[in-house]
Amino acid sequence: MQTSIKNQIRALRFQHDEMTQQQLAVRIGVTRQTVNAIEAGKYSPSLEVAFRIAHTFGKPLEEVFQFNPTPPSSSDVSSLPLLPQDVSLSLFSLP
């Protein structure tokens, strides 16, 4: 499953003396497999890891990562459980 966050990590690694995933992983304190998953868009980094990556390349966060929101599909929404109407009203009713 792809995330809604795209990134420029691969391009940035190659612009920085063809840095390997392992070298980046050591610099930011994660495994090479984590860098690979983030780079491939299979995993969204924590905010701290995202900042560490941006700092490593000397770039603002928004130059390394881009958020592309996609609305949930109808199948995603239709699978959500519904509250019975009387329950949802009782949650917001004032005495």
Image (cartoon, grey):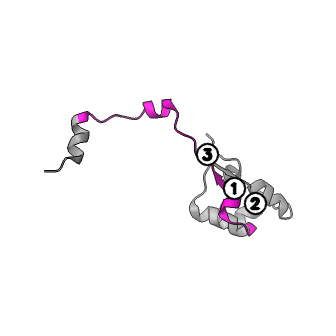
Image quadrant in which you'd find residue 62: bottom right
Instruction: Using the numbered discs, state the Cα–Cα distance from disc 2 to disc 3 in whole angstroms.
Output: 22 Å
Q: Answer above or below: position of 82 versus 46.
A: above
Residue ID for mark 2: 22
Q: Answer above or below: position of 44 versus 26.
A: above
Label disc, if present, on residue 3 of the rendered structure: 3
Which residue is at a point 21% across and 36% down the rendered structure image?
A: 86
- Range of residues picked out in magenta: 57-85
For numbered disc 3, what is the local secondary structure? loop
Which of the marked residues, 2 or 3, is nearer the chain's N terminus?
3
Q: In the rendered view, does 13 fall on the left or right side of 35?
A: right
Q: Is residue 20 something one can see in this rendering?
A: no
Which residue is at a point 67% across and 56% down the rendered structure image?
A: 65
Q: Residue 29: x percent and y percent?
A: 65, 66
Which corner quadrant holds the N terminus? top right
For numbered disc 2, what is the local secondary structure? helix
Q: Is residue 16 something one can see in this rendering?
A: yes
Which residue is at a point 26% across and 33% down the rendered structure image?
A: 84
Amino acid type indicated by mark 3: Thr
Query: Mark 3 and 1 residues: CB-CB less than 8 Å, in contact?
Result: no
